[in-house]
Amino acid sequence: MTPDATATLGTDLLRCDAAELLQRATECGLEPAPNLDRSELLAELLRHHLEQGRRVELTGVLELLPEGFGFLRFPSHDFDAGAADVYISPSQVRALNLKAGHTLRGPIRAPKGNERFFALLHTDTIGGRAVEELRRQIAFAARTPVVPTRPLALPADRPEWRLLGQLAPWQFGQRVLLVTPPDWPRARFLARLAAAIATGQPTATTQLCLLDQGPDAIAAARALAGPSVAVIATTFDRAADRHLATLELALLQACREVETGACVVLLVDSLTALARVAQAALTPAGRWLCPGLEVQALGPGKRLFAAARACAEGGSLTVIATLGHDPGSAFDAALWTEFGPRSNSEVVVDAKLAAAGIELPFDLARTRTRPEDETRSTAERRLAHELRQRLAAAEPAARAALL
């Protein structure tokens, strides 16, 4: 095996699914125990290559524990804890002042004695950059938020993207709220949107976080998003605190990337699911917004929305989040009251048009970006107003032909 091959060995293994890992184990002459999961198969292969004297490097996102040590979690494994996780000692954390969400890369070693996990020998890169550059980075919380001015343009190859570009133009660093009927396929739409953003803005980092989803919905979203979008997902059978931890680590990873000057777009489905799992996970405090929703259950969603910003020092975090809205639900109404006024842009799906299968089911009057005078010129606002009038006068099924 060549030096280049050994350097990318760990990265290649992380991309493999369970069937590919099992095939590789067979090719290596291993006889793994039956019924191993993906992480256990990965650990077997990593241990085998290390025993053969090969250098194995891994890249993962740091999750810090209250005790001061941490583990590398892998986006390709949805940040789940597993047998292949890499231990980061407290001394390594203190030496580099590492924070949760940092993406670390370096060589690993096999467990020794009574140890259970692989360990990181040293850190080669942080966030894809040399370790020395960490000293010159300004922490996310210390960066100066500014009014977003850089357009986040969508490709014009589909009518839905052209319409959104006219009615609700986005800027890097904004908070975008996608309000939909409860049974609308939000995850699939977000996956297509993430793929469109990755195509139209190839220099930006696009991440999709799906919470409390069915396995089939996750598989469909991964296929629609494509390889350019990092998809992190949790299924509805997971514990409530696992959903919260997954989103928290995805958000912290995005914040750490902004510290390097990157523009990150984080798409999340959904604020409704986030509030429900937070309600289940957090200790009741007795301050109710409505039956079934305490004030503190809004905390994770508010932290997500508040993180969106464009920074004077460079970089930005754009948050695009969905919100299921049933007019007869007090729970949904309370969420709308909290998050609606805090968004820069709203994309509202009309329930009647969506039920009728209309290609562009957006509410023309309520789909907008605020304030318009900061995001477009007077001429652009006039053209958008004329487009709204033309679309409103036409049959909904004929809207796509007018764009």
Image (cartoon, rainbow, N blue to C red):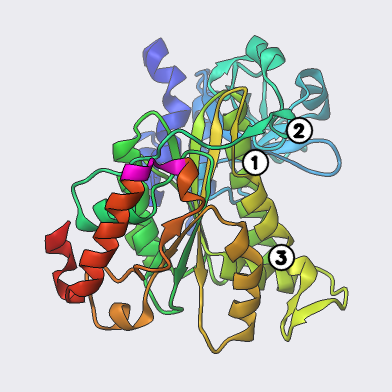
Tag nearer the camera, 2 or 1: 1
> Is 20 drawn above or below residue 104 in the view shown?
below
Identify the residue under disc 2. Answer: 113
Badge 2 vs badge 1, beta-carbon distance below 8 Å: no
Quote the CA–CA distance across marks 2 and 1: 33 Å
Image location (x, y in percent) of residue 154:
31, 44
Q: Amino acid at mark 1?
A: Leu
Dot 1: element:
helix
> Is 126 drawn above or below residue 26 in the view shown?
above
Identify the residue under disc 3. Answer: 298
The part of the image, by quadrant, that contains residue 31 is top left
What span is colored magenta in the figure?
375-379
Tag nearer the camera, 1 or 3: 3
Residue 99 seen from this side: yes
Residue depicted at 42% across the width and 33% down the height? 204
Image location (x, y in percent) of residue 385:
31, 58
The part of the image, by quadrant, that contains residue 368 is bottom left
Quote the CA–CA distance across marks 2 and 3: 45 Å
Q: Residues within 10 Å of mark 1 (few under 14, many from 20)?
A: many
Q: Amino acid at mark 3?
A: Leu
Q: Nearer the viewer, residue 18 or 306?
A: 306
Image location (x, y in percent) of residue 162:
25, 51
Quote the CA–CA distance across marks 1 and 3: 18 Å
Residue 225 seen from this side: no
Badge 2 vs badge 3, beta-carbon distance below 8 Å: no
Tell me if residue 2 is in the magenta stretch.
no
Residue depicted at 26% across the width and 58% down the height? 386
Ranked by sequence position, the earlier of labels 2 and 1 is 2
Q: Residues within 10 Å of mark 2 (few under 14, many from 20)?
A: few
Identify the residue under disc 1. Answer: 252
